[in-house]
Amino acid sequence: MDPKVIYSEIQKLLQQELMPITYNGWFQDMEAVEIRDQDDRHVLVLESANPLAKELIPQKFGDLIQKCFTMLNYPDFTFEILSTDESYKPVREDSDLVRENKTRANLNPRYTFETFVEGTHNKLAYHSCLAVADFPGNTYNPLFIWSDSGLGKTHLLHAIGNHVLENDPTKNVLYVPSETFINELINSISSGKTDAFREKYRQIDVLLIDDIQFLGNKEATQDEFFHTFNTLYNANKQIVICSDRPPEAIEHLAERIRSRFKWGLTVDIQSPDYETRVAILKKKIEQNNIHVDMEVLSYIADHINSNIRDLEGALTRVEAYGKLQNPDTDITIDIASQALKDYTGNDLKKTITCQRIIECVCEYFSVTQEDMQSKKKPQNIAYPRQIAMYLCRKLTTDPLKTIGQALGGRDHTTIMHGADRITSDLKNIHAPNNEELSRTINDIERRLNGE
């Protein structure tokens, strides 16, 4: 039997089962070197230049490979992986060194790939992050993740850092919100310690930066970040960035930074579907050792569809309310309904959709839906259209693409810009139309809620 032929057959099956980024990272360059007899089994010996493969492939993909042997009618086969770098000594997750490094890297140890629930809404983002964590600096660099708040971006950032340090605790990993980066830079300038600031950030192996949209309008910080980015990128260090919007929609961001964000891979996360919401709740009760019936989990998942943070908050609320009512009684749908009445509203409230919002805004401003969905830009049409964009983002969980389609096929950047315009006007108390706009928004929301 030719080991290369057998491995080639296995590769074909693995390609069908795994995402391309996962297959290419672990199996594409691995070679079969021999078949060795061991007891009553044949051992297919594989060799990989990746020092992590020897330990991690059996953990991650051992069952899948054994399944491939069975499918190919090699039931008495198993496998072994040799590393070309036998000097590599993997350190287990629970070692003191790994724990210390996670603390120094500002990582939450609870946010791992194992505690993250993969679904159709986040599949590409999840596997992209896993590929980056397996091969930092060599897969997607930079990796840019964007979504609305509460959908798991920060969880994935921490998961990457935790995974990297579990595999190689010598890596210099740092998770940092952009506001921390900004404040550290300001402090270093005021104290005359900019060299120390630069040395800290430009020696990092894996930089995980959150909420990058806050760099907009901060020219000095953008300039420092630009040079930090270049230094790390040119040294083949991994950069992962999160934002609440895609690069092209970040206002007042230097074009040279925006273009660099697009050098690697940009992925988004949408709102989870019903099945994924149930799976998230199931994992949550398993982690926290909470007893809640599937019927109640289904009720929560059916009524809370905004984001993961609200979903988990609703579960916590239901559990706490149940204990308050009677700690010895199982949580029922009736208890869940009472606990979530502020979340789910009352019977008078209708389901708010993009179409209902557009109809309500059109009626309020005496604008036709045809004008709202057209390319016309007079102020008496454009501003109501932006209000509709704002309300669709605020009151529905629809992705930007869906909102854009409801408003005449506009792209996500236009929707985000329009919503941001209204948000900015609402926050600016000195704007001449601030009070009138606030009343308008409140009036439309009351109409949508049947009040």
Image: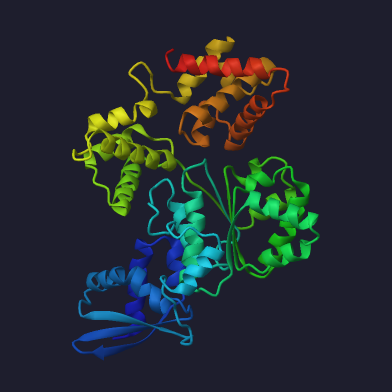
Is residue 81 found left or right of 203 in the rendered image?
left
Residue under the image location 37 percent in, 23 percent down: 345
Quadrant housing residue 48? bottom left
Query: Is 51 rendered above or below residue 321?
Result: below
Residue under the image location 23 percent in, 32 percent down: 333
Q: Is any part of residue 81 visible from this angle?
A: yes
Query: Is 233 rendered above or below residue 225?
Result: below
Q: Position of residue 415 (x, y in %)?
A: 59, 32
Q: Position of residue 336 (x, y in %)?
A: 28, 33
Q: Which quadrant is home to the N terminus? A: bottom left
Q: Position of residue 151 (x, y in %)?
A: 46, 44
Q: Position of residue 224 (x, y in %)?
A: 75, 56
Front position in the image: 251 or 211: 211
Q: Which quadrant is home to the C terminus? A: top left
Is residue 180 found left or right of 254 in the rendered image?
left
Number of marks in picture: 0
Residue under the image location 58 percent in, 19 percent down: 372
Front position in the image: 384 or 451: 451
Residue under the image location 42 percent in, 52 percent down: 123
Quadrant housing residue 184? bottom right
Q: Is any part of residue 135 visible from this angle?
A: no
Is residue 426 found left or right of 290 in the rendered image?
right
Way the structure is coloured: rainbow
The residue lying furthest to the top in this view is 366
